Image (cartoon, rainbow, N blue to C red):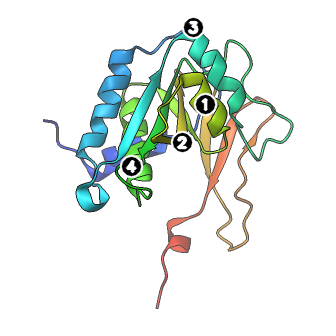
Amino acid sequence: MDKITLESLRELLKSDRSYRRFDESRLISESTLHELVGLTRYCPSARNLQPIRYRMVTAPEEREAIFPTLKWAGYLTDWDGPATGERPSAYLIQCLDTSLTTNCLCDDGLQLEAITLGAAALGIHGCIIKAFNAQEIISALQLPEKYKPLYVLALGHPAETVRLTDTDGTHDADIRYYRTPDSTHVVPKRPTEELIINP
């Protein structure tokens, strides 16, 4: 196994951005989704309960049913989401198995990060979506009652450029992402110094 360095991890994390426009013609296979979900087996799990489940969505009719249930970008108030041809080619619906627990604690975020990092390593990117109509998703996918949707991970091959930038380092800095005139998606990040509480 190749040695993982701090720098290589940093570069992978920097590439693991939220993308919202995709080349819809480039499909993602269920076997690839299966491999990505498999990464979550190696994540820490509170009480080692492992209560998270995933519904893979690749069929065109299911993708079409999922898309209108989603809200895409809160800061881009004049944008209703990707146009036809730029929509995700796959989704993972992250669900909590409520027959095991009603609180997954930190498992959901840990697993989503593992999946998106794995996807980024394959040149696939996505958008983790919390704003969605859960009841419509449950109905469209005929999810059993015990599965509670937590997040929707939209996945595809990117059709946009995402760039990180630094904020000015002040407490009330503008952290809202935005699009430039050339449609580059810009994401401001606070500097490390602001993240550390000094004595």
Q: Which numbered mark, 2 or 3, is in the foreground of this view?
A: 2
The residue lying at 40 percent from left, 13 percent from top is: 29
The secondary structure type at the circle numbered 2 is strand
Instruction: Depth check: give the residue in front, 76 or 60.
Output: 60
Badge 4 amino acid: Arg
Q: Could you tell me which secondary element the residue under label 4 belongs to?
A: helix
Q: Which of the marked residues, 1 or 2, is nearer the chain's N terminus?
A: 1
User: What distance separates the C-alpha of mark 2 from that of mark 3?
Assistant: 24 Å
Q: Percent from the top left, x then y, of residue 54?
A: 41, 33
Residue 72: quadrant of the picture? top right
Does residue 142 appear in this view? Answer: yes
Amino acid, disc 1: Ile
Q: CA distance from mark 4 to mark 2?
A: 25 Å
Residue at the (73%, 71%) spot, across then down: 172
Choose the circle earlier in sequence order: 2 or 3.
3
Question: In this figure, which residue is indicated by the disc labeled 3?
Answer: 25
Which residue is the site of mark 1?
A: 137
Q: Measuring from the top left, give residue 114's x and y in whole percent.
A: 36, 42
Q: Which of the two discs, 4 and 1, sits closer to the camera? A: 1
Mark 4 vs mark 3: give the one in front. 3
Crowding at mark 4 (Cα within 10 Å: few <14, some 14-19, many 20+): few
Amino acid type of disc 3? Ser
Residue marked by disc 2: 151
Disc 1 from disc 2: Cα separation:
11 Å
- Residue found at the far right of this picture: 78
Give whichever of discs 1 and 3 has the lower sequence position: 3
